[in-house]
Image (cartoon, rainbow, N blue to C red):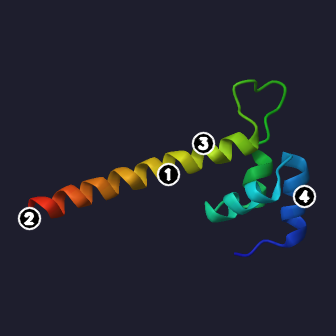
Amino acid sequence: MAYSDELWKKAKSKCRLNAEEIELAKKLGLNPKSLMKNVPNKSEPWKAPVGVWLREIDAKRQKKADQNQKRKDKASDNN
């Protein structure tokens, strides 16, 4: 489902994101509503800001992809 530019603009301002972070969220398959739901409240000090949260998700996915690639390379070398 494609989300309107209006929702992305609202998420950008509410979550205090820049254009690069919005593109990262789109690349990760997140939607603007999920971004707005993850804005930390004052009563939720353990939550990271949305921009930091996005970069953490991307780093975890990248690490997992690298591990899978190494595993595939090792398996092909053994054959």
Q: Amino acid at mark 1?
A: Arg
Q: Which residue is mark 1?
A: 61
Labels 3 & 2 near each other (Cβ < 8 A): no
Labels 1 & 2 near each other (Cβ < 8 A): no
Furthest toward the bottom, the residue is 2
* Residue visible at 78% across and 71% down in the picture: 3
Report the quarter where the C terminus lies.
bottom left
Q: Residues within 10 Å of mark 2 (few under 14, many from 20)?
A: few
Labels 1 & 4 near each other (Cβ < 8 A): no
Q: Amino acid at mark 3?
A: Glu
Q: Position of residue 26 (x, y in %)?
A: 68, 64
Residue 56's disc number: 3
Closer to the chain start, of discs 4 and 2, is 4
Labels 1, 2: front one:
2
Q: Which residue is mark 2?
A: 79
Label 4 and label 2: CA atoms lie apart by 52 Å
- 67 relative to 46 in the view: left or right: left
Residue 64 vs residue 70, the one in the foreground: 70
Label 1 and label 4: CA atoms lie apart by 26 Å
Q: Which residue is mark 4?
A: 10
Closer to the chain start, of discs 1 and 3, is 3
Establish if 79 lies above or below 41.
below
